[in-house]
């Protein structure tokens, strides 16, 4: 795929993402317009999530008719997906829906493009704070047009890390999963990290690593749409991405460890317990 193609894909996606941002901002500013359409207590979706995904898929589908799509709300509506080598847009219309519903301004529209299963274009846009993180493979990572870079922190005791318990992900996986998640959290406290944060959006956790505010982030139970766009941004900002066990990172594995330095990533991987974090019977 040539570079001008990637530019074109990026520009079209950016324009549509900004349009989606207007929908999110309008709903956020008028709380009454945040309408829940389906929910369990921990798995929320609003009409805005669905409208943004529709807008993105319609616009990208029109511009690039041979491209494929994986979108959170299309998957929730029962659409099956598999990642293939074809150009594939991986979309999370609102990452941080719980924040959105509670009007916490940490939400992100995530649009990633994979080619040959590799993320090559990524946009993570928070329309409430007007922060637009973006990257094209090989061209660096940017926030609102300015280059960003990861931190150089190597020591756990100098790190601020995100280790979401993913309470959302705990439902349906049973007490053993929760015990291990809590145990892992405790281990990082004992190891003496400088601070823990949990922003309620995988993509925001990741772009904060990309811009060097957070030194590392680890989470289990994620989906490709939570992280695909942010993966490109993190890599282009110099981050190390691993499977939490220390193996190679796999976009479809439902887990991620990302850090500003490889040394810190390995340190965190060594502190954590990694067994049995998978939810039985779920597609990957
Ligand atoms: C969720 C957020 C959250 C993470 C969950 C995700 P959503 O995405 O990224 O931080 O812990 O695993 O499902 O549902 O708000 O798009
Ligand atoms: Ca969701
Ligand atoms: Ca998400
Ligand atoms: Ca979402």
Image (tube, helix red, strand yellow):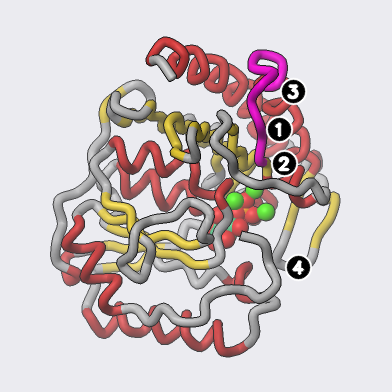
Which residue lies under the disc numbered 2?
49
Q: Quadrant of the N terminus?
A: top left
Task: Say whether disc 4 or disc 3 marks the residue closer to the N-terminus.
Answer: 4
Element carrying mark 3: helix
Residue 147 shows in this picture: yes
Q: Is residue 169 above or below residue 95?
A: below
CA–CA distance between discs 3 and 1? 10 Å
CA–CA distance between discs 4 and 3? 30 Å
The response on whether ligand 4 sits within 8 Å of label 3 is no
**CB of mark 3 within 8 Å of CB of mark 2?**
no
**CB of mark 2 within 8 Å of CB of mark 1?**
yes
**CB of mark 2 within 8 Å of CB of mark 4?**
no
Residue 51 at x, y percent in the picture: 77, 33
Q: Which residues are magenta?
A: 61-70
Labels 3, 1: front one: 3
CA–CA distance between discs 1 and 4? 22 Å
Element carrying mark 1: helix
Which residue lies under the disc numbered 3?
58
Nearer the observer, 92 or 69: 69
Residue drawn at point x = 64 percent, y = 32 percent: 25
Q: Is residue 124 left or right of residue 150?
A: right
Labels 1, 4: front one: 1
Numbered tag placed on residue 284 in the rendering: none
Q: Quadrant of the C terminus?
A: bottom right
Which residue lies under the disc numbered 1?
52
Q: Is residue 255 left or right of residue 158?
A: right
Element carrying mark 4: loop
Whether residue 121 appears in magenta in the rendering, the answer is: no
Quadrant containing ligand 1 reads bottom right
């Amino acid at each position: 795929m040539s570079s001008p193609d990637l530019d074109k894909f990026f520009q079209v996606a950016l324009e549509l993402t900004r349009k989606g941002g207007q929908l999110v901002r309008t709903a956020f500013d008028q709380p009454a317009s945040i309408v829940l359409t389906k929910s369990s207590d921990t798995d929320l979706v609003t009409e805005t999530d669905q409208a943004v995904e529709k807008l993105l898929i319609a616009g990208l589908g029109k511009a690039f008719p041979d491209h494929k799509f994986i979108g959170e709300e299309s998957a929730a509506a029962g659409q099956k997906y598999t990642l293939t080598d074809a150009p594939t847009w991986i979309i999370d219309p609102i990452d941080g829906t719980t924040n959105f519903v509670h009007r916490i301004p940490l939400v992100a529209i995530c649009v990633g493009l994979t080619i040959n299963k590799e993320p090559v274009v990524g946009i993570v846009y928070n329309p409430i704070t007007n922060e637009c993180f973006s990257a094209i493979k090989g061209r660096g990572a940017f926030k609102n047009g300015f280059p960003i870079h990861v931190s150089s922190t190597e020591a756990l005791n100098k790190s601020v890390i995100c280790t979401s318990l993913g309470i959302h992900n705990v439902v349906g996986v049973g007490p053993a999963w929760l015990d291990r998640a809590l145990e892992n959290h405790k281990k990082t406290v004992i190891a003496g990290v400088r601070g823990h944060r949990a922003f309620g959006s995988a993509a925001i956790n990741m772009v904060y690593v990309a811009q060097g505010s957070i030194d590392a982030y680890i989470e289990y139970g994620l989906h490709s749409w939570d992280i695909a766009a942010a993966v490109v941004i993190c890599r282009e900002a110099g981050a190390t991405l691993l499977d939490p066990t220390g193996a190679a990172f796999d976009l479809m594995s439902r887990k991620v460890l990302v850090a500003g330095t490889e040394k810190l990533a390995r340190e965190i991987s060594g502190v954590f317990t990694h067994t049995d974090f998978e939810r039985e019977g779920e597609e990957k």
